[in-house]
Amino acid sequence: MEIVERCRARDVLDDLFSRAREGNGRAVLITGVAGMGKTSLIHDLRTRAEASGALVLDAIASGSERDLPMGVMGQLFPGAGLSATDPAGAVDSVHHLVHRLSERAPLVITVDDVHEIDAASLQCLLYLIRRVGGAHVLVVLGERAEAPQIGSALTAEFLRNPRCALIQLTALSAEGTGSVLAGLLGPEGAAGTASGWQRASGGSPLLLRALLEDRVAGRWTTESAGPTAGEAFGLAVRYLLNQLSGAALSTARGLAVMGSAPPPGSLDRLLDLPGGAAARAVGTLEALGLTEAGQYRVEAARSTVLEDMTPEERARLHHKAARFLYEDGAATGVVARHLVAGGTLEESWILPVLRDAADQALRDNDAEWSITCLRVAHDACTDSRQRAAIRADLAQAEWEVDPAAVRRHLAGLVDDHRRGHIDLRQSIRLIAYLLWHGRPQEADEMFADLDAVEDQLGEESRVRLETMRVWFAHSYPVLGARYRHNSALAEMALGRSVGAVDPQSDGALVLHALMSEGPISNVLETAERLLQAVVLHNPPVAPAIAALASFVHAARLDHAAEWCDLLLQGAEQRAPSAWAVFAAASAAVESRLGNFDVARQRADQALSLMTPEAWGIAIGVPLAAKVLACTAQGDREGAAECFRVPVPEMMFQTLPGLHYLQARGRYHLSVRRYHAALGDFHACRDLMAAWNLDVSSSLSWRLYAAEALIELDSPVQARELLAEELTRQDSGNRWMREQSLCMLDRLGSSRLPDAGPAPAEERAEAEEAAVDGLSRAEHRVALLASQGCTNREIAAKLFVTSSTVEQHLTRIYHKLGVRGRSDLPTMEDSANAGR
C-alpha cells in the first residue's frame, strides 16, 4: 500500500500501466475520502492510455443501481448478454471477454465509486483481478472511504494479492499544495501563500480547486492574494456533505450549530448519537478538509452547512445546545448566541441569560450584540414590569450605536418611570436621553420626582442623581438654574481622590467647579488628573468632555487639542456615538486654534458617524466647527450647507446653541450680511445675560459684533464693545486682547469717534496714522505675508488667531487692489513706514 499525494499517485499508475502493456497484468485500488482526487486520477489515466493506443473500458457505480444485478458489468460490456440469473456463467464470460480483448491491444478497465457496485458485478471483478497476472490488462478501481482507515472487503482483497496495488490518497501537504499553486499561478504567485491555501482547504484537492475558481471569479488583481470562499467553494462543500452517512452528516450539522469546538461528549448528547459516534464522525470531517480541532476551517463552510438545514432543524439544535451549555455552566454570552439563533424558550432562566449577555457585551464595546440580545428578550417577555426594565436596557445599548433610535422609546420609558416599572439607575439614564434630545421639561419633571425621594436613596444613587443635576445645570442654564450652585456633590466627594472611584461623578465635580469658580488653577489640575486617570482605559464620554471644557474655558486650547488627539486614538474600536462626540470636541478646539483643515475633517467625521437626528441638541458643536473652518477657508457654500441641516429649536436654549449662533454670525460677517451677523451676536449677548453666564473667550461675541458695527457705520458702539472686551480680558488671553487692539486700529484709521473713553495705551495704538492706506495691524500682517510667512506663522508672531489673519488679508487685498499674497508689493518695515 502507498499513501501518496497526487503527483506520486500518477507515477505509480504510469508504472502499473507500463507493466500491463508488457503482459504483466495488474490491478490497483485508489481509496480515500471524498474530494481527495480519485476521479481525477482515473480520468487522467484513461486519457493517457487512449492516447497510447490502449483500449479503455470504463464504468461508474451508483447507489441507485446497487440492486441492479450486473449493472456495472453491463456498462463495461454492453451487448455481451451477461445473465444475472447465471452468476457463474457471467463470471466466466467476463473473464474470456477480457482476455480476448487484451490480445488485440492493452486493455484498461476503470470503475469509479466501486463502493456502490452491485454484488454480481463485484464477484466478476474479484474473479478477474485474481487471474489478471498473465494478461495485458490494468484494472483500476476507485473507492470512497468514509474515514482514512482501511476496512472494506475490497481493500482486504487488494492487500493480500501481490499483483494488486493499493493507493490511499490523503490530504495535500503544504508542499503538495504549493506544487498545485505553482502550476496554476506560477512560482511567484505561489511563493509564501501555500500554507494559507492549505489551511483553508484542509489539503482537499476538491476544496482547493474550488477556492482557486472563486479567486479567478473574484478578479483578484494581486498574485499574492489569499483564498476567499465563494460560489464554487459552497458547491464543493455541498458535494462533500452529500457523500456523508447519517451520523457524519448529523455531526457536521452539530458542529455548524455549536460554532466553536464543543466539549468532549457534548455532540453525542446534542445529536442523540451512541457514545463515541460523534468523535469518529469528526475524524471523517477533518479528513475531508472541512474541520480542524472540531471547528470549521472556513466560516463559509459552516454557513453552507447551516443553510442546507431546515429552519426547524436549526432551531431545535440551537435550543438543545443552549440548554446543554447552560446546564454545564457555560458563559452567558455563548448560551445567548444559541438563544438568539434558535429563538427563545419559555423557561425561567432564558431572560436573565440574555440580559446578562447584553450587559457584558456593552462593557466589551459590542453594542450591536447587546441590542440583539435585548430585542430577543424584549419580544419574549410577557411581564410588564420586566419588559419595561428590558426596554430601558435596550435604549441604553441603542444609544451607543445611534442615539436617534432611543427617541422611539422615550414616551414609553417616561410612562414606565411614572408607573415605577424602572429602577433609579434607568430613570437617571432616561433623564440624560431627554436632555440630549431637547425635552428638558419632561426631564425637569423627573428631577422633581426624584428630588422628593432623595432622602430615601443610598449614597451611590444620590451621587448618580447629583451628577445628572450638574449636567442639567450646565446644558440648560435656565431650567437647570436651581442646581447651578448645589454643593451636595462636592460634599459627598470630600476625602476622595479624582479618578479613584467613579469617573462620571468626577466629571460632574469638574463641571460644577467650573460653573461656580471658573477655570481657576485648582479646577484645571483636577481636570488634568481626571483625564490622566481615564484616557487610557476606555474613557467615558461625559467626564472627558467636562475636563476638556475646563481647558477650553481657560483658553488653553493647545492643551485641549493634545487631549483630544489622545481620546481619538483607537476611537474607531468604540461605539459610534463616543467616537462622534470626541471628533466633534476636537473639531471645536481645532477651529479655534486656526487649524481649519483638521477641524473640517473631524467635523465631517463627527457628522458622518451620527445623523442630525442622533445628535440632538449637541448638533450645534460639529456644525459650528465646520462653519468656522469653511468660512476661514473661503468656502462659502460649504458653510451655507451646514445651515441647511435641521437643528432642534430647543438647541438655542443650550450651550451648543451659543456656539452655533456665534459661528453663524461670523459666517454672515464673511458674506457682508452685517445686520444678520449683528442679530446673531446680540442673540448670544441676550442669552448669556439671561443665563448670568460669561463663559470662555471661545464664545466671545463682542469683537465680532464690533466688526459688524464698524461696517454699519456705528463706530461709537463698536468702541464701547471693544473697551468692554479689553476690560474683561486678563493677561492669559493675549490673543483676544490683540484682536481688540486691531479693531481699534481700524477705528483709528478712518472712523475714530470724537468721544468715548479708552485706555491710554489703546488710544495711542488706535490713533496712530495708517501706513500706505492700511491700518497699523494690517500693515504688520502684509509685511509678514510679503516675506513668505504662512497664516499660522503670522498668527504666532503677532499673537492673534489664524482667523484674524485671514480677515486682515481679505481687507489688505481689497485696499491694495491685488488678488492674493503673491501679488503683494515688497513691504517696508513698519518702523520705516511710520517715519
Image (cartoon, grey):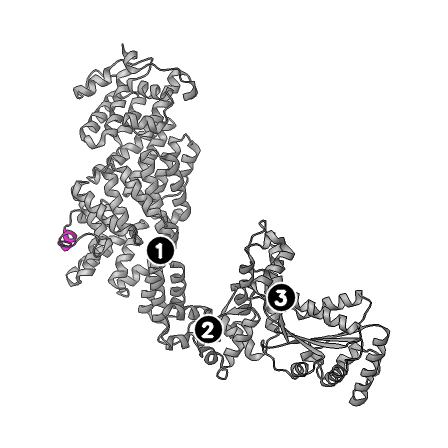
From the viewer's perspective, is the residue at label 3 or at label 1 nearer? Answer: 3
The image shows residue 527, relative to residue 316, as above or below, that is above
Crowding near the residue tagged with mark 2, few <14, some 14–19, many ≥20 C-alpha atoms within 10 Å: many
- Relative horizontal placement of residue 575, taking residue 454 as reference (left or right): right
Q: Are marks 3 and 1 in contact (CB under 8 Å)?
A: no
Q: Which residue is mark 1?
A: 399
Expressed as whole percent of the image width and height from the top left, the position of residue 761 reads 18, 20
**Residue 483 bears which disc, if any?**
none
Which structural element holds mark 2?
Answer: helix
Q: CA distance from mark 2 to mark 3?
A: 30 Å
Expressed as whole percent of the image width and height from the top left, the position of residue 456 reads 16, 63
Q: Which residues are magenta?
A: 487-496
- Relative horizontal placement of residue 159, taking residue 523 as reference (left or right): right
Amino acid bearing label 3: Leu
Q: Which residue is mark 2?
A: 318
Which structural element holds mark 1?
Answer: helix
Q: Which residue is mark 3?
A: 206
Crowding near the residue tagged with mark 1, few <14, some 14–19, many ≥20 C-alpha atoms within 10 Å: many
Instruction: First in sequence, mark 2 or 3: give its number.
Output: 3
Instruction: First in sequence, mark 3 or 1: give its number.
Output: 3
Instruction: First in sequence, mark 1 or 2: give its number.
Output: 2
